[in-house]
Image (cartoon, rainbow, N blue to C red):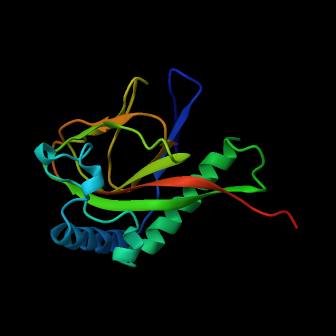
């Protein structure tokens, strides 16, 4: 795992998730199938625009579109909580857990981009790369001097308010991205 320190006291985490190859291949196949059925989501129009090829493949609840995503979503949630809680981002790690409320999967084709945007209504966001081969194209955290090359099995977790973008990708890549919010546990 790597931790990136931006210009401000904000951290961005990245590391390999450790998804088994056979399961990851099934996820990629499912994402291609979902991409054919629903090539974009209208609400993403300003980010994944017509010029950029309508990148997003699934709804905000990818695990409803294809239950195979459920295990991946749970793994991302578990790893994200581990990183965030180990870094003292929460006031009380015993009572706060971050839960994924939205997750979508998609395919970037060569030369597609993503405009600068953020996910301001959430606490943390993530991007997981099911497939990203060399030459690598980064996710750029605008105005922070941080960019992280997308690589197969890499998970990136970051505060949702950070603006980020993707320059034209060098080759196809398959991803899942989403948002998390805090869930407060009741003390017994």
Instruction: Tell me which residue sits at (18%, 53%) in the image.
Output: 54
Q: Position of residue 45 (x, y in %)?
A: 23, 48
Q: In the shown orientation, is residue 65 left or right of residue 99?
A: left
Task: Specify the quadrant that holds the C terminus.
Answer: bottom right
Say whether residue 11 is visible: yes
User: Looking at the image, which residue sits at the far bottom?
Assistant: 67
Instruction: Tell me which residue sits at (29%, 71%) in the image.
Output: 25
Q: Position of residue 73 (x, y in %)?
A: 47, 66
Q: Position of residue 176 (x, y in %)?
A: 36, 58
Question: Which of the 4 quarters of the picture holds residue 21?
Answer: bottom left
Q: In the shown orientation, is residue 180 left or right of residue 144?
A: right
Instruction: Tell me which residue sits at (56%, 46%) in the image.
Output: 123
Q: In the shown orientation, is residue 156 left or right of residue 37?
A: right
Residue 36 vs 9, above or below: the answer is below
Instruction: Tell me which residue sits at (29%, 65%) in the image.
Output: 58
> How many numbered marks have been drawn onto this rendered protein structure?
0
User: Looking at the image, which residue sits at the far front?
Assistant: 43
């Amino acid at each position: 795992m790597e931790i990136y320190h931006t210009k401000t006291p904000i951290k961005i985490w990245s590391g390999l998730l450790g998804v088994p190859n056979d399961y990851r291949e099934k996820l990629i196949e499912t994402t291609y199938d979902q991409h054919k059925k629903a090539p974009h989501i209208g609400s993403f129009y300003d980010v994944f625009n017509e010029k950029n090829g309508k990148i997003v493949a699934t709804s905000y609840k990818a695990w409803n579109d294809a239950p195979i995503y459920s295990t991946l979503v749970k793994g991302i949630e578990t790893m994200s909580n581990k990183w965030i809680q180990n870094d003292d981002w929460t006031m009380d790690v015993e009572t706060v857990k971050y839960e994924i409320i939205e997750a979508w999967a998609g395919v970037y084709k060569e030369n597609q981009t993503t405009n600068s945007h953020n996910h301001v209504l959430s606490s943390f966001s993530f991007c997981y790369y099911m497939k990203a081969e060399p030459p690598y194209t980064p996710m750029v955290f605008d105005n922070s001097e941080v960019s992280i090359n997308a690589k197969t099995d890499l998970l990136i977790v970051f505060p949702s308010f950070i603006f980020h973008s993707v320059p034209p990708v060098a080759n196809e890549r398959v991803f899942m991205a989403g948002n998390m919010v805090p869930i407060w546990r009741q003390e017994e």
